[in-house]
Image: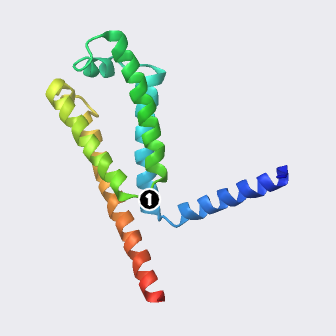
């Protein structure tokens, strides 16, 4: 039977290995991860869940004309964005960062088509998405460099 002490040791081992994994990622990659995760988590929590933004509802109103359904959809989008932010923080797959780039570009296209005046505001979706796309591209490059270095090290040890 597993004791509390065994459970604590197992948890401590998992935390230790997770900590080692984060340390092995490199400062640039971790900074990209943290900034991207923070952005998605914040954008999912604050303007969608904590205080639902009229701008979010207006944008989604182009696809969902029933106000109540749009509110529900915005809430679910907020939950999805929060989960996506956490996933970006812990993944080691460049594909997810490429998916992030595609999603950001599609969101920008959506805004440009339906609410182009938003692109003229200070700190608008264009400037925000451009910065996030650049961080995602840096993360992809860093992940590929890390994977290539690991592959090269594996080749030299054989």
Could you tell me if residue 5 is visible in this image? yes
For label 1, the residue is 92
Nearer to me, 15 or 2: 2
- Note whether 130 is above or below 28 in the view shown: above
Q: Residue at x 81, y 56 (%)?
A: 6
- Image coords of residue 100 (percent x, y): 32, 46
Q: Residue at x 42, y 61 (%)?
A: 28
For disc 1, the neighbor class at 10 Å (few under 14, some 14 to 19, many from 20) is some
Local secondary structure at mark 1:
loop
- Image coords of residue 134 (percent x, y): 28, 52
Nearer to me, 121 or 99: 99
- Image coords of residue 138 (percent x, y): 33, 59
- Note whether 103 is above or below 57 in the view shown: below
- Image coords of residue 150 (percent x, y): 44, 75
Q: Residue at x 44, y 88 (%)?
A: 156
Query: Relative to 4, is 97 on the left or the right?
Result: left
Nearer to me, 14 or 125: 14
Nearer to me, 24 or 156: 156
């Amino acid at each position: 039977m597993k004791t509390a002490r065994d459970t604590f040791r197992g948890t401590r081992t998992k935390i230790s290995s997770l900590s080692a994994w984060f340390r092995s990622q490199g400062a640039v990659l971790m900074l990209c991860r943290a900034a991207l995760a923070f952005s998605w988590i914040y954008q999912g929590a604050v303007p969608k869940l904590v205080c639902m933004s009229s701008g979010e509802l207006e944008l989604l109103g182009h696809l969902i004309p029933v106000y109540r359904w749009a509110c529900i959809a915005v809430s679910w989008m907020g939950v999805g964005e929060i989960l996506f932010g956490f996933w970006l923080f812990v993944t080691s797959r460049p594909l997810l960062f490429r998916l992030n780039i595609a999603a950001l570009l599609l969101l920008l296209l959506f805004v440009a088509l339906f609410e182009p005046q938003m692109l003229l505001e200070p700190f608008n979706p264009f400037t925000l998405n451009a910065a996030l796309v650049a961080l995602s591209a840096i993360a992809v490059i860093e992940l590929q460099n890390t994977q290539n270095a690991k592959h090269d090290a594996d080749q030299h040890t054989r």
